[in-house]
Image: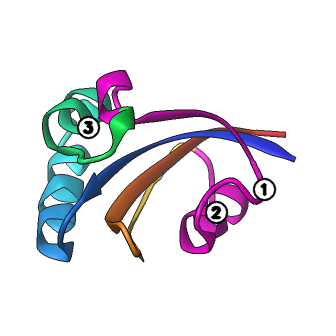
Amino acid sequence: MTAMARHILVKNKEAAEKLKQRLSKGEAFDVLAKKHSTCNSAKKGGDLGEIRKGQLVKSVEQVIFKKPLKQVHGPVKSQFGFHLIEVYYRD
C-alpha cells in the first residue's frame, strides 16, 4: 500500500492548533508549510511524496494509512514535534 501526503511539523501543540485554525479558514496548506514547518519537506509545501508503510514514525503512519483523505488531521505528536497531516492519495 502506498499513500501521498503533506504535513506541517511544528515544535508545540499550540502552534499546530493555530495553524489548523488558519487552514480551516481557507489559508493555503503549502504556503503555511513553507513558512512554518520545521521539516525539510517545507520547501515542497510540506509534500512528503509517495509513502510506503514502515517509512515514517508510527503515529504519523496511523493517520496516513487509516484516516479519511483530503482532511487535515492533527495535531499528531511524534518525537519530532507536532504534525498537521493531509492525505491526498492512497491505493
Q: Dot 3 lies on which element?
A: helix
Which residue is tagged 3?
33
- The vertical placement of 10 against 58, above or below, is above
How far, Cα to Cα, is label 3 from label 1?
A: 23 Å
Range shown magenta: 42-69
The reply to whether the C-beta atoms of the residues labelled 3 and 2 are less than 8 Å apart is no
| Residue type (three-letter) at the residue carrying disc 2 | Glu
- The vertical placement of 40 against 37, above or below, is above
- First in residue order: circle 3 vs circle 2: 3
Answer whether residue 46 is magenta in the image.
yes
**Label 3 vs label 1, nearer the camera:** 1
Q: Position of residue 35 (x, y in %)?
A: 13, 34
Identified at 39% across, 67% down, the residue is 74
Which residue is tagged 2?
61
| Residue type (three-letter) at the residue carrying disc 3 | Ala
Q: Residue furthest top?
A: 44
Identified at 24% across, 57% down, the residue is 20
The reply to whether the C-beta atoms of the residues labelled 1 and 2 are less than 8 Å apart is yes
| Residue type (three-letter) at the residue carrying disc 1 | Lys
Which residue is tagged 1?
53
Q: Position of residue 15 (x, y in %)?
A: 12, 64
How far, Cα to Cα, is label 1 from label 2?
A: 7 Å
